[in-house]
Image (tube, helix red, strand yellow):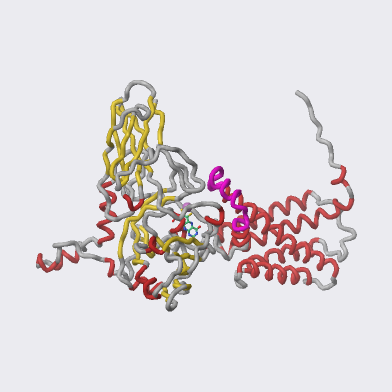
Amino acid sequence: MVRVSLPTLPTLQTDRVRAALPTALTALVAGIAGVAGSYAVAGFTPGFVVAPIEAGLSKSMPGVVVTFAIQYLGSLGQKLNLAFAAVLGIGLFAGVALVGLAVARRTAVGLAGAAATVALGWVAGAALTGDPVLAAGAAVPPAVVVTADAVAAPDADGADRPPAPGRRRIVGSLAAVVGLSGVGYVLGKRNTPTTDGSLDAGDSEALTPTPGSSMADEGDEQEATATPEPTERERLLAAAEEQSFDVDGMEPLLSENFYTVDISSVKPDIDPDGWELTVTGAVEQEVTVGYDEIRSMEAENRFVTLRCVGENLNGKKMDTALWTGVPIMDIVKRAAPQSGCECVMLRAADDYFEEFPLAAMEHGFLAYGMNGELLPRAHGYPARALIPGHWGEINVKWLTEIEILDEEADGYWEKRGWHGTGPVNTVAKLHAVNNADGEVTVGGHAYAGTRGIETVEVSTDGGSTWQEATLTEPLPGDDVWRQWKYSYEHPGSSHEVVVRAIDGTGTLQPEEESDAFPSGPTGWVSRTVR
Ligand SMILES: Nc1nc2c(c(=O)[nH]1)N[C@H]1C(S)=C(S)[C@@H](COP(=O)(O)O)O[C@H]1N2
Ligand SMILES: [Mo]
């Protein structure tokens, strides 16, 4: 065993640095206190000071970096970005506290340092988040730390402070950081809003009576009230459950864990009472609708599958839900669009924007409900667009504006090199491989947007011969996936299972493999079964 003694860094030994360390430590604690305090009052919302920093970082990130992060880091890239934003936020409020500490030492007035810290912190917090009330959460805790520091070391000029942070000071700081972060975390979690809620209040329009099941026919009103007829939504949800294949390792027809893809990890937090959707741009007259108005329109329920253009060929960013809402053109038509390019830009509360042909919106949907519940915050509460057959990215969440354009323009992802506004590629995924006593069952989901899935074929010999898989009954809707499954006798040796789909136009899923960037992955999914 070789002993290595670490060389001491001579520069760190200088007196000036040693003298500055206690102040730096206090400022760091104050910075953490600011971020923790902001989280405590704002939760994981845009009022949290780290949120705008993170959003700014991802918006200014060069397209190649974003694309690399999506392909190779997945959601880790976004977490790193968030962590970096948090570090910058801590740095910012540490800087604020440094100014406060300097003021405290240069003035005789006891609370001048704290006052300076609060004032600066407030300005910084409000400027970042645009919320002067919540900004107090970021401004007050650093001021408390600055005050505590002044009480602990009251000498005005700092001349006879200890030359280096003593052990007690470090332990004290650590305890403060842990305590503040803990309290901030607990309070912030409680303050992070969700939209858990049933759709039922006030949407009796969505209830469609089951054909031939009128209570009057039976003449037995009492029994009918005791067991109310299922709503259309309930019947559709039940149908999805009933029609799903029960194969281990395969999600049902209605996704249990719907993926999310967002440009920033802190999602908008919108009060539906203040929310408005406006049709603007090349229109005869602008039209604005509020939340109550769309809820009072006649509701429809639609199964729609979404798939992200950036996912891997056999990835899991493809899911299906039953959405409740209204046809989007019922609102858009009122504005009488007169587009020079027959194209439209959708804009959202997170500054996301996507452009695509007006024709694609013809059967578009404005959804405010998902699987019988209010649209969850993560999926666009209070309302999102659903554009049939197209890649997920144009299904804009937290929708605020439908801008009818006169000239083509790039969307958020197109500015970063993606071509994700077009129709989805056909895909058959292979997620389940089960071997029970020599009988192998394979299965997955197949999706081809509005073209629909006609057939799924399976090869168990690396693509030499093909057999037809069994498909689930199609769910109602023109943009929904199907499940496929296929069972065969294990040949006794390792073999290659390949799967491919044929869409509703009779076109075979292309075999040629390509990466997700820029137009979505292609190729046949295969897996070795031993
Ligand atoms: N406002 C907004 N809408 C958005 C996004 C976004 O980041 N912001 N992401 C898009 C992308 S890339 C996809 S794939 C889908 C995903 O929808 P989901 O998160 O509900 O699954 O939303 C789209 N709509
Ligand atoms: Mo996406």
- Which residue occupies the extreme front position in the image? 340
**Residue 206, image x and y in percent?**
28, 66
Residue 190 at least partly seen: no
Q: 159 or 139: nearer the eye? A: 139
Residue 173 is situated, as x and y percent measured from the top left of the image, at: 73, 54
Residue drawn 33% across the image and 48% down it: 481
Q: For residue 303, what is the image quadrant?
A: bottom left
Q: Position of residue 225 (x, y in %)?
A: 19, 66
Q: Residue at horizontal 23%, vertical 60%?
A: 230
Q: Is residue 93 something that shows in the picture?
A: yes
Outermost residue, bottom side: 285
Q: Which residues are magenta?
A: 57-76
User: Looking at the rendering, in which quadrant would you find the N terminus?
Assistant: top right
Task: State whether residue 390 is above or below residue 41.
Answer: above
Closer-to-camera residue (505/194): 505
Q: Residue visible at 27% across and 58% down?
A: 234
User: Residue 74 in magenta?
Assistant: yes
Residue 276 pos. (x, y %): 45, 73
